[in-house]
Amino acid sequence: GQNIDQPTEMTATEGAIVQINCTYQTSGFNGLFWYQQHAGEAPTFLSYNVLDGLEEKGRFSSFLSRSKGYSYLLLKELQMKDSASYLCAVSDSGGGADGLTFGKGTHLIIQP
Amino acid sequence: DAEITQSPRHKITETGRQVTLACHQTWNHNNMFWYRQDLGHGLRLIHYSYGVQDTNKGEVSDGYSVSRSNTEDLPLTLESAASSQTSVYFCASSDRPAGGPAEQFFGPGTRLTVL
């Protein structure tokens, strides 16, 4: 089985930086995904890590440490539109053929 | 543009009725998935398919079935709806490009209420 933990809710200020952590315990591992989900909408893909280290994509970066079972999503220059839930998900076969196991999501609130 | 659609977007039904939720994608993806999303649980995998005539059970498959007769569609059937199946249902699809991550694309969701 797989267990994925992330904080339930976080609050940050517009223009600032926020880091959302995710820890996982899995029987197998073939990649970690981050998705963004606005209220009432579908999840949308943000990033994917399969090797240790940092992946940067504009204002968003994601880090992975496989030995520690740990990842984080870093959001810079926060904007009001970044208010959403952020979902950490693990795959044990690259997230392609097999489904993903999701954490419960972190609800991020951006304040002016 | 390629897309993934779900219908209906909202459905109210009664306990014991059979319900089918439709999912249609035009990316020609081999892999398709059904998830349900509930407060306090996050997204949980119900069934998935690698291709035509292939179906597999996920974490919470009891009371649900799927069939894959073509690449584009993966309908989800609730054989006898129960109040515990009140949820938001998301369909997703993916492919596996050489050397790249297999991003899953999600449909807009179906909100199902079982009374």
Image: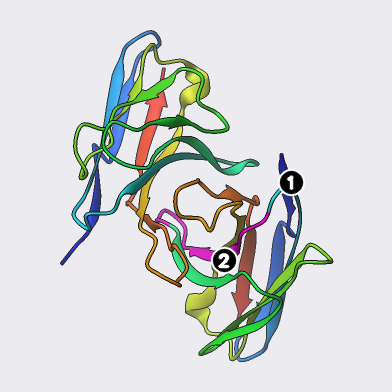
Quadrant of the image occupied by residue A74: bottom right
Disc 1 crowd rating (10 Å Cα; few below 14, some 14-19, many 20+) is: few
Q: Marks 2 and 1: which is nearer the front?
A: 1
Amino acid type, label 2? Trp
Residue B50, percent from left and from top: 37, 42
Instruction: Where is residue A58? Give x, y as percent.
Output: 51, 90
Q: CA distance from mark 2 to mark 1?
A: 19 Å
First in residue order: circle 2 vs circle 1: 1
Residue A65, image x, y percentages = 77, 72
Left/right of residue B57 with respect to residue B17 in the rendered view = right
Residue A27 circle label: 1
Magenta segment includes B71: no
Quadrant of residue A87 within the rendered picture: bottom right
The residue that appears at 30% across and 49% down in the rendered structure is B30
A101 in relation to A87, above or below? above
Q: Residue at x 62, y 69 (%)?
A: A50
- Which residues lie in the magenta part? A29-42
Disc 1 marks which amino acid?
Ser
Query: Is B54 situated above or below A17?
Result: above
Magenta highlight on residue A33 = yes
Name the residue furthest left: B1
Q: Position of residue A86 (x, y in %)?
A: 58, 64
Q: Quadrant of residue B114?
A: top left
Query: Is residue A62 shown above or below A57?
Result: above
Mark 2 packing: few (<14 Cα in 10 Å), some, or many (20+)?
A: many
Q: Assign a secondary structure to mark 1.
A: loop
Report which residue position mark 2 lands on.
A34
